[in-house]
Image (cartoon, rainbow, N blue to C red):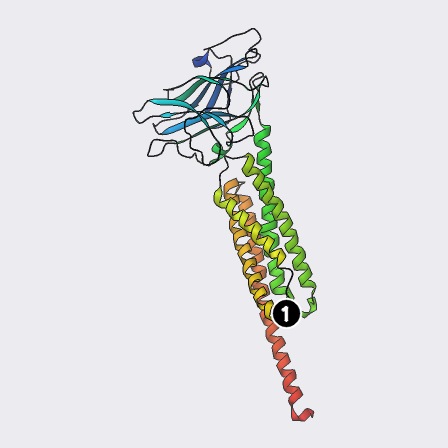
Amino acid sequence: MVFFSTAIFLCKAQCSSTSEFSNFASCTDLDVLNSVLYWNYNISSNKVEIAFRQSGIYNDSTWIAWAINPTSIGMIGAQAFVAHPRSDGRLIAYTSSITSRETILEKGKLSFPVYGISAIYANNSITIFATLMLYSRISMVNHVWQRGPMSMDNVPSFHGHSKDNLWSYGTLNFLSGKTGKRGPERFMVMKKIHGGLNVIGWGIMLPLGVVIARYIKVFKTTDSAWFYIHVICQSLGYIVGVMGWTTGLNLGVQLSGFNQKAHGYIGISLFCLATTQIGLFLRPKELKFRKYWNIIHICIGYGIIILSVINVFMGINILKPGKKWKEAYISILALLGTVAVLLEIGTACYLFFSRKNKNLETTDGASPFNS
């Protein structure tokens, strides 16, 4: 299976252990999941002979996979080589084309030719061997590797969402042996932008706008200025939030291994509800309809705030940027809550004394001594 040519091997071994795979000219230690990839690349035939090994496997209920993704960085579209133990304890190796997030690693043909796939288990490691033909003479590919548990039915189950599981992708140049960091770093930047925009838009601006609408309008000195401040605050929150939402949709398409359905569904709900609120800015002039409009507007508004806060915390738990980010957002919410409580007390006192003074004025006006 090993093929050689004077123009084939332009890179040297770049991994910690090569003695067991001396027939491979190139290798690289992958960043996560205790994985190493060995290969021979034949320029003239455009074939690649690979051996993908994952160590630290101490039970018979783990599957591993390595894949090339010809369309993007991530899981959807990946053309995978899979290995896992069968019910009789022996290893099985096969190919699987991943077309959606719900795809289970079932046997199937890949979009490129594959020859002689097999797997072995030794020294608490599983190694997959295969020969494949690249699409063209472009030696740079997107690749992804993964591991996960077997289900009770002895079929591969979904992998976990630890940092290592979510970072197991990148780029690889079979010719030079260089592995790319640009892909993962770019997506991590996108995740941070997505999180930051959503925290500012949905998680801070919208609650602040509600505080303004609920409390500031009570004071007569604010006149109608509170309404314009409320509209501006909510509009900016909506615009920033939608920017964060669209960034999340883009991540969901490209980084398909990042599978968080609940977070995504809440995001879609927020967008729909917030868009509905924009339409509700057109308030009816008739008072009998205005009452129902106010009820709907307030209910949707508070629903958006609740969902926003929940989804921000979900996003923080998914992204895991560090305790300081979660603590900072909790501090902001605590500050808004404290301000709301103080304003609640302040407005209650203001309304109480306003009514008291009005009653006194009314009483004084009706007194016989003023006639």
Residue placed most toward the observer, 134 or 64: 134
- Residue 194 vertical position relative to residue 45 in the rendered view, above or below: below
Q: Is residue 241 left or right of residue 93?
A: right
Q: How many marks?
A: 1
Element type where label 1 sits in the image: loop
Q: Residue at x 60, y 28 (%)?
A: 182
Q: Residue at x 60, y 33 (%)?
A: 186
Residue placed most toward the observer, 333 or 176: 176
Image quarter for residue 81? top left
Q: Quadrant of the N terminus?
A: top left
Residue 278 percent across, percent down from the top left: 63, 56
Can residue 16 be seen here? no
Q: Quadrant of the C terminus?
A: bottom right
Residue underneath mark 1: 286
Mark 1 is on which residue type?
Answer: Glu
Q: Is residue 194 left or right of residue 91?
A: right
Image quarter for residue 122? top left
Q: Is residue 191 left or right of residue 90?
A: right
Image quarter for residue 192? top right
- Residue occupying the far top of the picture: 6
Residue 172 percent across, percent down from the top left: 55, 22
Residue 320 percent across, percent down from the top left: 52, 40
Q: Residues within 10 Å of mark 1 (few under 14, many from 20)?
A: few
